[in-house]
Image: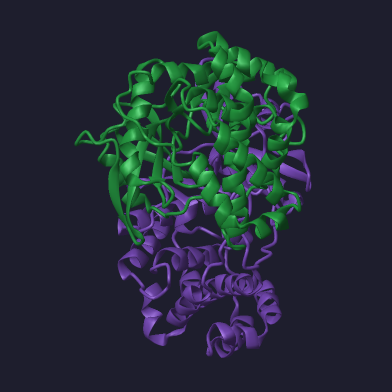
Chain colours: A green, B purple
């Protein structure tokens, strides 16, 4: 939640000019996204006000991955999914390099979409989100590019090994033991042969814009990759069906989300059967990055690290045989 | 540069509904202002998109002062000054209290104005800013309320006394001596009988929105108060006519700013004669708050304190008899 790079108005006007979307009339740094800097941009073109999000990719996004992310937005939007298009510059490029005191950084100008991110979703909203997730899974079927999931099981193992058992136990006395047990299970039983394709992989409420019960935009595709569709369902389930601290599970949200997904893309029996394990994986994925950030974020950082226990609680929920019926 | 209070979408929709400006369609926290939280809000009303800035006043703004600030905006806008109007709520109030976990906070919804804040002003831009400053001085002539300047000479004396000579010398070995000398001079010679009225008191480039050479908005009136017009000219001079570190003075910007002001509201001879001393006061005002913040901001604060030496250098410039011709 920060703007990491300061851009003067004159510099900003030059950047926007290269995209040929009219004259810059407003630019406000927005407190959105944790890894990149974002501005809400307004231009005037032929008497019409137009709005965009300008994103400057900071250190966490690999520039080599940008064509995948940005071409994907265009592909999904062209297939009718609620996704913002990328503006291409005067040379047809989807992103540009911009010289800053800390070196060249990539910039992309993306269509503005209306909508707000809900913090207390209703079942009808969860249903719509399930449907939108299925829609992008289907819409990406003929997307030609692929990208390995850099935050899959091997990354969780590495991150948690880097944390160290002692440090995990400093977060919670049980955490070292739980992580060891669950990582062993996930490594032994992770399914390899389920339907796969492009997934969002991070569809938290913050990354969904809604107006009422309607999804107006899925945003922040910077973890998108090629992986199991059902794993994306599990990630979205972990993201939407609990109180943010993970302490309360909401069965009505869960049912609505899964029904909304299945109404657009029915899950096969094997996918359904894999969901309980995939959900443990989804909880482990966020536990791993949060625990790592929790232990490695300097105290004076602009961004406050999020509590890893929120996902340890989800993991505990998914691992409990009493909750096996959730995905039935 | 931060959003201090998190507002969920549902909470935000409720807040906006009370202002009767249509249905909330977008809300983005913006990285603007150092003391308050701000959101760029979009609503739809009768098929038309409308935009506003929602400000939540955090601890630095006294709620008792809000009627002064907000009524002033309406007054200036009604008199044709480039200032955003305040939206009044369903009960006619210019601000509302909102319950948060840290206690009740005041909220105001203010018209959105186009424009960007320049960081490398041209003389023509400085001229326009001088004119806009004079325009608000004239437009506020019949504004009925008044507010004491809480950051006038007694406050500088107190803040710098609270810093302590030793701490000031830890910033720069000469700073203790300079502050003592200048405060004594300002106390002895500060003029009492110059024309006075409502002043902005903080008209830095960040607080001016421009499109090309035109001023589209003066913003952030939360230091506005009743004081000497010529002191406001001196503050604006200190804010616009130097490189931000205070090391380089730009005579062309200075001439254009003063001419732009005088073209709308000519300065009297006594005001002109007082400007060199008022400018030393203006530099001292920002030196005082910056030195205090520099010495008292915790290392993990969201906002990085600004370098007090940037205004020690301006003070040095204004105190140098060789530069007496600047205001001639």
Between B219 and A267, the one nearer to me in the picture: A267
Residue A214 appears in the rendering: no
Q: How many marks?
A: 0
Asked if residue A266 shows in the view, the reply is: yes
Q: Where is residue A232 in the image (x, y as percent from the top left)?
A: 53, 27
Whether B118 is drawn above or below A287: the answer is below
Image quarter hosting the C terminus of chain B? bottom left
Q: Which residue is drawn at 38% across and 68% down?
A: B243
Q: In this view, does A34 lie to the left or right of A16?
A: right
Q: In this view, does A313 lie above or below A99?
A: above
Residue B168: which quarter of the image? Answer: bottom right
Quick check: B97 left or right of A38? right
B33 or B109: which is nearer to us? B33
Residue, x 50% and y 72% (percent of image)? B270
How far across and how far down the image is residue A223, in percent?
46, 37
Q: In this view, does A242 lie above or below B189?
A: above
B114 or A276, which is in the foreground?
A276
């Amino acid at each position: 939640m920060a703007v990491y790079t300061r851009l003067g108005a004159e510099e900003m006007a030059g950047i926007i000019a290269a995209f040929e979307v009219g004259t810059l009339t407003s630019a406000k740094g927005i407190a959105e996204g944790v890894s990149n800097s974002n501005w809400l941009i307004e231009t005037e073109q032929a008497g019409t006000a137009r709005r965009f999000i300008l994103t400057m990719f900071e250190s966490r996004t690999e520039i080599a991955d940008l064509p995948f992310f940005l071409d994907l937005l265009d592909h999904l939007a062209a297939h009718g999914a609620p996704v913002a298009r990328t503006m291409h510059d005067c040379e047809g490029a989807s992103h540009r390099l911009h010289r800053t005191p800390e070196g060249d950084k990539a910039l992309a100008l993306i269509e503005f979409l209306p909508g707000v991110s809900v913090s207390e979703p209703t079942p009808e909203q969860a249903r719509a989100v399930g449907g939108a997730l299925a829609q992008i899974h289907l819409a990406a079927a003929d997307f030609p590019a692929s990208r390995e999931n850099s935050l899959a099981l091997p990354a969780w193992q590495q991150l948690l090994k880097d944390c160290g058992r002692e440090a995990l136990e400093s977060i919670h006395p049980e955490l070292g033991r739980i992580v060891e047990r669950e990582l062993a299970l996930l490594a032994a039983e992770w399914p390899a042969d389920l339907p796969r394709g492009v997934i969002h992989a991070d569809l938290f409420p913050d990354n969904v814009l809604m107006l009422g019960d309607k999804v107006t935009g899925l945003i922040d595709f910077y973890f998108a990759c090629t992986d199991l569709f059902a794993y994306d369902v599990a990630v979205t389930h972990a993201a939407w069906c609990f109180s943010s601290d993970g302490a309360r599970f909401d069965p009505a949200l869960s049912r609505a989300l899964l029904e909304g997904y299945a109404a657009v893309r029915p899950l096969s029996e094997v996918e359904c059967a894999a969901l309980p394990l995939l959900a443990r994986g989804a909880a482990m994925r966020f536990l791993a990055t949060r625990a790592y950030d929790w232990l490695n974020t300097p105290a004076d950082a602009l961004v406050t690290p999020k509590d890893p226990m929120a996902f340890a609680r989800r993991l505990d929920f998914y691992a409990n045989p009493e909750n096996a019926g959730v995905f039935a």
